[in-house]
Image: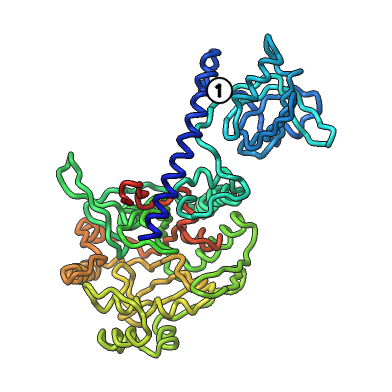
Amino acid sequence: MTDDVSSTESHLQETARLKRFREQRLKKIDELRARDIDPYPPGPVEKVAATVALALPNGTPVTVAGRVMLFRLMGNIAFLQLRDESGNIQIMLSRHTIEGEDRHGDYKFLVHCLDVGDIIAVDGERFETKTGEQSVNAQRVTFLAKSLLPLPDKHAGVADPDVLLRKRYLDILLNDDVRDMIYKKARFWRSIREYLEQQGFVEVQTPALELTTGGADARPFVTYHNYLGVDVRLRISMGELWQKRLLVAGLEKVFEIGRQFRNESQSREHLNDYDQMEFYWAYADYEAGMKMVEDLFRYMAVQTFGKLAFQLHRNGRRHDIDLEQQWTRYDYVDTVERLSGMNVLAASTENITAKLDQLGVAYESDGLNRARVVDALWKYCRRQLSGPGFLVDEPVDVSPLAKRHPRNPALVQRFHVIIAGSELGNGYGELNDPVDQAERFAEQERLRAGGDEEAQMTDNDFVEALQYGMPPACGFGMSERVFAFFMDKSVRECQIFPLLKPQRTSEQGE
């Protein structure tokens, strides 16, 4: 209770401080408007980047624009640090160079109205100060957006990580590493798109709203479609069953990059809405898929991070990862037995559950079934593997969309990318037998009826499409979790604006 009261008092004090600050800034806005100066004029602003302006010869006329980050007033001279997307540049204001009918009065009014946080444009000339600082000597300053709230102290910053995520724009403004992460993430997805296009894949777009979700074991978000008068679901995969319909239609190499949604818990590795890529490759098998995925990861790493070797901190330990080395193959059944002493093909559901209890592994008891406990046991074992490598040949119980293995029908041709104790991608030799697919959907429906909300839904239209014939194929998917791993951060930190709970107000605290 004491902590809650203290937190509420602190919140009220900060609210009062910001109110006083805002009132002072609003008075300055009134003063500007009294002189017919618009504090929020329309564009455009013909500016050059700060880094470009710094390289211009002294005496060159130049216009720069950005946010005031520092402001030092020294009588008849003021120095500003102006920041745009490219970097910082120093601005000198002097009553001798500011244009106006009353230069001294205009200078005094300008420095009175200017504040850290304001966005301005500066027309002037490039020059070098006596201390050698490359600067712009201002002749005219134009207000572009008067700030009403103070920026956090650049050095102290914001200590609360929750506040940083809620006000991510401030974190990006003050933290170069966060801004650089945005650029790296753009390179990450661009490199994946470039690689696939170089391999002859065509990018497609499939529905985000579906009557029946497919392609993953996950709980969907459900909403009501007013026009059609039916419940629809946000996709939980990147159009897997739609992309495979395109293979039926005769396309041979397709991929999609987009947003998908899962109505589940959040963790260091899991979010509810995130970017995903999936490709489907006709006439290929999962061996060909693994070879291409290795090449894809190496291409992505070099293009995004400029290296192939990483030191990652995951699952309670440090992992030294070198993508250039030969990737390890982890046989599913052998690996689980080696690390847990349990043969998942021979053991009963009860035996596996008892082993989980013995190991202290948590699992979902609602809708408990063999697939879920086998998967829980595998995840316990997975954390002990560094990789890079592929988990291969999984039990059919946990893979309703993968093709059965020709040497053992209890297994399927499925692979996962294993790096630093986690799965960073999922691939199949795709199931193209419509009878087998229908039977597996029926089994998934039985599991759903038993309470497993993550079991897959039957898609009869997809089964019908398979009956027209789909060539053998390999499919693979990976999400922005891969980027977060190689950044050595949580996936939430690597989203620009992650979804958060509503912030409690002082009234709610009371």
Residue denoted by label 1:
44
Q: Residue furthest right?
A: 130
Residue lying at the far top of the rendered structure: 101
- Vertical position of residue 278 compared to residue 18: above or below: below
- The answer to whether residue 239 is left or right of residue 386 is left
Between 286 and 469, the one lying in front of the other is: 286
Q: Quadrant of the N terminus?
A: bottom left
Residue 439 appears anywhere in the view: no
Question: Residue at point 61% right, 70% down?
Answer: 322
| Residue 493 higher or lower than 55, as above or below | below
Whole-percent x, y for residue 340 in the image: 41, 87
| Location of residue 57 in the rendering, given as x and y in whole percent from the top left corner | 80, 29
Secondary structure beneath dot 1 equals loop
Q: Position of residue 251 (x, y in %)?
A: 38, 52
The three-letter amino acid code for the residue at tag 1 is: Pro
Q: Residue at x 32, y 75 (%)?
A: 404
Mark 1: few, some, or many residues within 10 Å (few <14, many ≥20)?
Answer: few
- Dividing the picture into quadrants, the one containing residue 68 is top right
